[in-house]
Image (cartoon, grey):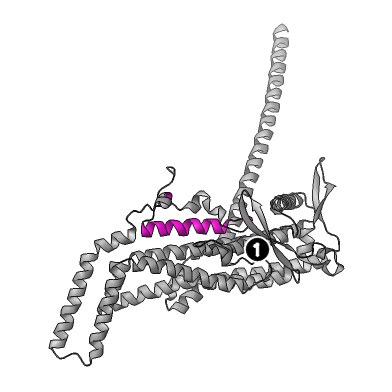
Amino acid sequence: SKCYSCYIDDACTGKVGAYVKSIFPVTSTIVACIKGSLNNILNGTCSAGRDSKSQKVGFLKVAQEKLKKAVMAVLILALILFAIKAALGGIQSPAELYMLVIKFSLVVYFTQGNAMSHYYDQLVKLSIGLSDIVLSAGGKQSICDYKESDYPKGYEYIAPWDRLDCRVLFYLGQQLIGGPATVLLGLFITAGMFFATMLFNVKMMLCLVAIFAVLMLLFIVIWLVYIFLLSLIALTILILISPLMIPMVLFQATKGFFDGWIRQLMVYSLYPVILFGFLALLFTVFDNLYFEDLEFERHKVTIIDAERITFKLKNPDQCNNSKYDYNLACMFGNMKFLSQPAFLGFNAYAPDFRHEAEMLWTKLLMMVLIGFLFYHFLSSISYIAAELAGDPRAGHVGASLSPKAMMGSAVNLAAKVQGSGFNKARDAISNRLGNNKSGTDGGKDEISSGSSRSSGASDSSS
């Protein structure tokens, strides 16, 4: 398309929608867009002309061409130094010669061909594949169970993100037996009713707890996507400078730079795996509290000519069993809103539950408490990955946009908006009162001046 750069991936223009399987894809679309665009920039693939196999010179190829002479000079220098060492009798065993030949071969292989482009793709696939394995091991197995076989070749990496979108949608109130249209409609109506209920102070505390739980979950998901994209960008940059870093393995004085480069590759490859391991544990706890032993099955639906996969209860009447009277998924899935008179002719909508709210309070507060604990543990996730790879300084990645920072920014923004609105209302009231006061004072002045004139007239007549 002429409106987009050639390097912008098709996923950024919405074409990946035909391959995702979640009925409401958000994170999968964002990740596919960034991942595809970075790959196009690195390898020089023109996404707009993919059908005609259009290719441009990629950034990695440009770096290899620019550094080709420098790499050859480094190889010659290493060979000269080795020859001098051998002439001086510094070679203790033939193993040193064999190791030099192996190093020479690997340096030429990784810096002069397309090997790094290939291994970049494999490294990203390995990282996402391990993340998907870890994520699929957590949570309820019968729900949001997207498999790599559900996707066409080249799009298998979308599976973990579809799992994430699917579960978030369920936690936000997706109907257990509803289709995609009723899901989205019910989601927006439920959100609107919650805010209306909170506004008019009807069961306000319950709605505040629910909204707080949803905000924590959304901040965790946003931070997860943010860290994954940072890791992907870091991997791309590390591969881009590989023609400069790989030849440093030939000399003992520069080998430390090469070792640091390898550690960075390990760190940013491990980040997604550890993040999804954390998310799998969170989903396991949430699923046990929210779904308990509800059983789901896959259903294929069609949304705008695209085949999607949704999950519904195996038995549509399962929630009608008295055993599930206090099941959170059943309670929120079957929740209705009753209109109640509030004030000034307005009606407030209050959630109506079929049974007492004590058990709902208990489970909802438990979810909030567990989510709060996981939420505060997030700051340690990046440091765990950095410590495992032996580079503690890499743990600072993403620290500027941690969920704590996002929550603090949201609270500060809300406070500023509230303060600004209060100040404007106060100024408006003050101006109004000031105008009324000035008008009243003006009337008194005119009356007093008139009385003085009349008194003056009486004096003159006398």
Q: Which residue is mark 1?
A: 167
Tell me the quarter of the image containing the C terminus: top right
Tell me, yes or no, if residue 401 can be seen here. no
- The answer to which image quadrant residue 36 occupies is bottom left
Let me know if residue 66 is in the magenta part: no
- The answer to which image quadrant residue 322 occupies is bottom right
Task: Characterize the magenta stretch by its predominant secondary structure.
Answer: helix
Question: Relative to 128, is 344 on the left or the right?
Answer: right
Question: Relative to 339, is 434 on the left or the right?
Answer: left
Front-most of residues 322 and 110: 110
Kind of element beneath mark 1: helix
Tell me the quarter of the image containing the N terminus: top left
Front-most of residues 10 and 175: 10
Q: Amino acid at mark 1?
A: Arg
Can you name the residue that lies furthest to the left here? Answer: 87
**Which percent across, then down, holds residue 310?**
67, 59
Q: Residue at x 84, y 70 (%)?
A: 323
Q: Residue at x 51, y 68 (%)?
A: 128
Count of picture labels: 1
Magenta extent: 21-48
